[in-house]
Image: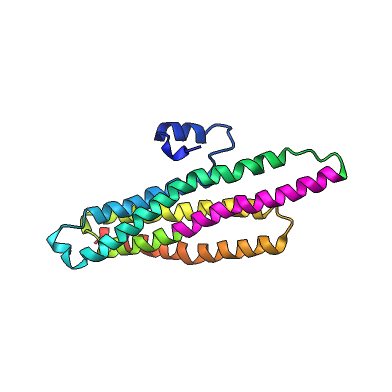
Amino acid sequence: MEFCEKSCKDFIAELSSKAPVPGGGGASALVGAVGTALGGMVGSLTVGKKKYADVEEEIRALMAKADSLMADMLRLIDRDAEAFEPLSRAYGMPKETEEQKAEKDRVMELCLKEACSVPMEIMEKCCEAIELQAGFASKGSSLAISDAGVGVAFCKAALQGASLNVFINTNSMKDRQYAEKLNARADELLKKYTALADEIYDGVCRRLKQ
């Protein structure tokens, strides 16, 4: 599918269409990649500056991790679409007979679990990105601190967006034990990392208003 290879204009046009993919999961992955890239920008504006020579090694390490996360998130744009398409087809399976109903339920459950796996991974990546933003915001160039703030706001939004794509799928699962396990994990990540993102964002705001 390679949605990540499309131009911004084409991606947005497809996102706003009635096509089932890309959707909220892919959009969340893209927003997470953009937020992570802004952290990388802070790093790029920091390395090589005498004022920040004592943290350059650490900043370069953060930048390397950010590059890896960006690549992962871009990959997940397409993975999310690939995982959702079988689910989209499963919704249209016939259910006129008991056998058909049983088969549809079986396929739906498999597809729902697969469809959940990608937004869960997007959430995990967003959490890693938020942790990186803490380093960029606290040790990066003060001239680019606003970009770290924007970056962490984007990563938080992507985290929350991906969580909704988990919840909409777990809501339809018949295996409630599995569904509640995923919900609990998503809630755990949301609680910890939205708080951390807010802390970083608020810290940037305080510094900009001094």
Relative horizontal placement of residue 58, taking residue 35 as reference (left or right): left
Quick one: quadrant of the C terminus? bottom left
| In this view, 79 is above or below 57 | above
Relative horizontal placement of residue 149, taking residue 179 as reference (left or right): left
Q: Along the line of sight, which residue is nearer the eye, 29 or 86? A: 86
Q: Which stretch is magenta?
A: 99-126
Is residue 209 visible in the rendered image? The answer is: no
Query: Looking at the picture, how far across and down is residue 67, in whole percent?
Result: 34, 53
Residue 105 in magenta stretch: yes
Is residue 77 visible in the rendered image? The answer is: yes
Q: Quadrant of residue 69?
A: bottom left
Relative horizontal placement of residue 205, taking residue 178 as reference (left or right): left
Q: Along the line of sight, which residue is nearer the eye, 162 or 87? A: 87
- Residue occupying the point 46% across, 64% down: 193
Query: Looking at the picture, how far across and down is residue 169, in whole percent?
Result: 64, 51
- Residue occupying the point 28% across, 51% down: 41
Magenta-drawn stretch, dominant element (helix, strand or loop): helix
Residue 86 in magenta stretch: no
- Residue occupying the point 68% across, 54% down: 171
Q: Quadrant of residue 89?
A: top right
- Residue occupying the point 50% across, 57% down: 123
Which residue of the protein is positioned furthest toward the right in this rendering?
97
Query: Looking at the picture, how far across and down is residue 61, in whole percent?
Result: 29, 62
What scheme was used to colour the molecule? Answer: rainbow
Query: Looking at the picture, how far across and down is residue 37, in whole percent?
Result: 34, 50
Q: Quadrant of residue 10?
A: top left
Count of picture labels: 0
